[in-house]
Image (cartoon, rainbow, N blue to C red):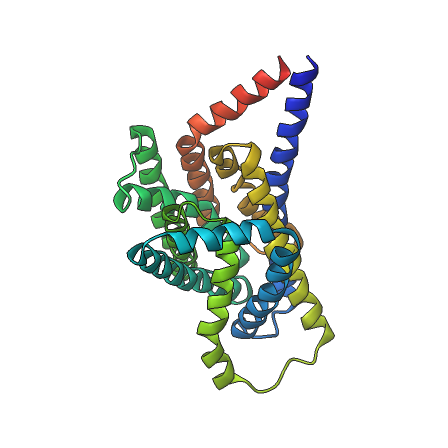
């Protein structure tokens, strides 16, 4: 009985870590909207630059063992395999940069709900990409759920084509990033992210230098950039990686939907954005498709809870 109690407590810790990461991301629109006066490019530049500093400080202080293991691993593989890994990191970095830029732009210049819709549809796009590109198997019920999701996207487009295009852009870029991450097995995810952010800095430096007209002098801007880099980038990534130690990825995959649900709440209750009948109908239809797609994983969560309680 004591062992079961310890197991339940340990599992709950991982569940709370996963839950915490997506709850944090759900409120991401607040600091972004607070610095809406600055361009999306500047927010992206300084988010990446600041994240680079903090993530490497975290790795060098707390994860040197994992860093050494990855360096040894990359040294031990063939030249062809190293070239493949390098290409995967480069393409994933480009997808990540495009996702971050489109998300920031949508939050501040399109609508909060378009960004939230993107992260509702993103896991379905990822699964569809895995089915088409990686030849992963999908059950009939999951294929049906994807058809329903497509109908919801088309339905939303009848109300606002601009919003649905931005939602699809954000979702596709992040889905592409996740698909490449799934292909990169055997490396520490945080080390890979740190390398991708470093590469993003290198890729963006020419654009930054060309557009540079002086560092922002606003303390309000810099305080929010630090908050975005630490609270809304590094901390939730740490939490989600920690959660995967003790819970299945399918369970964490269900939790991702907490993010857009909170984001919708923030958009309507905090920023007073108006949701049209078209949007509400599309969101409810997509929510049903999400529930259908994840039905087996939802059943697994309740089975796990029942086991822990017995």
Residue drawn where x is 71% and y is 68% of the image: 223
In the displayed structure, 290 sits above or below 133; it is above
Q: Is residue 182 visible?
A: yes
Q: Quadrant of residue 169?
A: bottom left
Q: Position of residue 210 (x, y in %)?
A: 48, 85
Residue drawn where x is 55% and y is 22% of the image: 304
Q: Quadrant of the N terminus?
A: top right
Q: Is residue 192 found left or right of 77 in the rendered image?
A: right
Mark count: 0
Q: Position of residue 98 (x, y in %)?
A: 43, 64
Q: Is residue 177 found left or right of 79 in the rendered image?
A: right
Residue drawn where x is 43% and y is 35% of the image: 288
In the displayed structure, 122 sits above or below 298; it is below
Q: Quadrant of residue 270?
A: bottom right
Residue drawn where x is 55% and y is 49% of the image: 66
Q: Is residue 171 visible?
A: no
Q: Quadrant of the C terminus?
A: top right
Q: Quadrant of residue 273?
A: bottom right
Q: In this view of the protein, which residue sits in the foreground, 284 or 159?
A: 284
Q: In this view of the protein, which residue sits in the foreground, 18 or 36?
A: 18
Q: Position of residue 120 (x, y in %)?
A: 47, 45
Q: Is residue 293 found left or right of 137 in the rendered image?
A: right
Query: Outermost residue toward the right?
Result: 219
Q: In this view of the protein, which residue sits in the foreground, 301 or 289?
A: 301
Q: Position of residue 173 (x, y in %)?
A: 40, 57
């Amino acid at each position: 009985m004591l062992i079961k109690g310890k197991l339940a407590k340990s599992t709950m810790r991982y569940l709370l870590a996963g839950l915490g990461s997506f709850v944090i991301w759900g409120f991401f629109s607040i600091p972004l909207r607070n610095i809406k006066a600055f361009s999306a490019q500047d927010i992206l530049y300084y988010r990446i630059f600041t994240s680079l500093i903090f993530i490497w400080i975290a790795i060098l202080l707390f994860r040197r063992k994992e860093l050494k293991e990855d360096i040894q691993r990359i040294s031990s593989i063939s030249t062809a395999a190293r070239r493949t890994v390098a290409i995967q990191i480069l393409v994933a970095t480009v997808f990540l940069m495009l996702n971050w830029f489109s998300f920031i732009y949508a939050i501040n210049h399109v609508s909060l709900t378009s960004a939230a819709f993107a992260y509702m549809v993103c896991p379905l796009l990822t699964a569809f990409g895995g089915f088409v590109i990686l030849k992963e198997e999908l059950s009939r019920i999951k294929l049906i759920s994807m058809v329903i999701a497509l109908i919801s996207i088309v339905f939303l487009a009848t109300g606002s084509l601009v919003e649905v295009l931005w939602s699809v852009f954000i979702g596709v870029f992040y889905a592409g990033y996740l698909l490449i991450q799934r292909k990169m097995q055997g490396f520490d995810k945080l080390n890979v992210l740190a390398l991708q952010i470093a590469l993003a800095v290198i890729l963006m430096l020419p654009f930054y230098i060309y557009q540079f007209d002086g560092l922002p002098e606003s303390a309000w801007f810099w305080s929010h950039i630090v908050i975005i880099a630490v609270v809304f980038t590094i901390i939730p990534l740490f939490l989600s990686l920690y959660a995967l130690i003790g819970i299945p990825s399918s369970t964490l995959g269900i939790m991702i939907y907490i993010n857009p649900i909170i984001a919708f709440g923030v958009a309507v209750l905090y920023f007073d954005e108006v949701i049209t009948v078209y949007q509400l109908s599309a969101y409810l239809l997509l929510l049903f498709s999400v529930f259908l797609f994840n039905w087996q994983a939802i059943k697994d969560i309740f089975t796990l809870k029942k086991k822990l309680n017995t």
